[in-house]
Image (cartoon, rainbow, N blue to C red):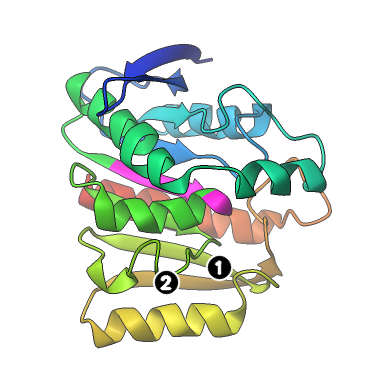
Amino acid sequence: MGEMVTFPTPNGGKGSAYLAKAKAGAPGVVVIQEWWGLNDQIKKTGDRFAAAGFNALVPDLYKGRVAKDPDEANHLMTGLDWVGATEQDIRGAVQYLKQAGSTKVAVLGFCMGGALTIIASVKVKEADAGVCFYGIPPVEAADPKKIRVPFQAHFASQDDWCTPAAVNGLEATLKAAKIKADIHRYAAQHGFFNEQRPDVYNAAAAKTAWDRTQTFLKAHL
């Protein structure tokens, strides 16, 4: 079990996050929430990374608010300051783990957090790797051609947000920019990694994605 902590943000403010520790000096992972907020499911994902040997920090981007239904989640996501979330909360979280002893730190996120992961992979200079689950930001938020870290992504073939066409476009953009990216597609629905959503959870796809993520992180952190 982890604990709630506060951490300084680059602008002199403070962020809040759930911290699940493996051991001193272990590599770090900043885990970015889905559009639901810092709920029990994403905290347990942090615990899972800690059990796998990573110091995991899950920043609370909604500042204490957790959505109870898709309408509220959409309201919270559209109201989020994405620039501030990336340049303050996520960057501050990466810095916090490094100052606590993690030599290398990855950013990893789901859905909204996946899109923020791509932005962080472009803009957070302290990040050492990025793992995106079914999220692509608008190009004006971050140009994928400028991704500067080892990058892995997991997408669902049944997804009306990160559509197969959008994923193909992202992959083509990265190839044209000669950015090495480890991109995987699954015969599953958006949100397939979330074990608390039986309507979309796909155990086989989630296990494969988890194994691939561990292999990638161990290779780059």
The residue that label 2 is drawn on is 183
Given residues 41 and 202, the one toward you in this image is 41
Badge 2: residue crowd in 10 Å (few <14, some 14–19, many ≥20): some
> Magenta segment: does it hold 108?
yes
Q: Main secondary structure of the magenta part?
A: strand
Give left or right: position of 215 versus 128.
Answer: right
The kind of secondary structure element at disc 2 is: strand
Quick check: 198 left or right of 173? right
User: Which residue is pictured at 77% across the width and 57% down the height?
Assistant: 200
Please state the horizontal and vertical placement of residue 142, each as a whole percent of the image.
35, 63
Q: Which residues are magenta?
A: 106-112
Q: Gap between marks 1 and 2, in whole Å?
A: 8 Å
Q: Position of residue 101 (x, y in %)?
A: 18, 22
Which comes before the other along the chain, label 1 or label 2?
A: 1
| Residue 151 lies in the magenta stretch | no
- Image point (30%, 30%), residue name: 92
The amino acid at mark 2 is Ile
Is 182 placed above or below 61 here?
Answer: below
On the image, numbered disc 1 is attached to which residue? 155
Q: Are marks 1 and 2 in contact (CB under 8 Å)?
A: yes
Q: Secondary structure at mark 1?
A: strand
Left or right placement of residue 102 versus residue 195 in this view? left
Look at the picture and state if 90 lies above or below 139.
above
Mark 1: few/some/many CA within 10 Å (<14, 14-19, 20+): many
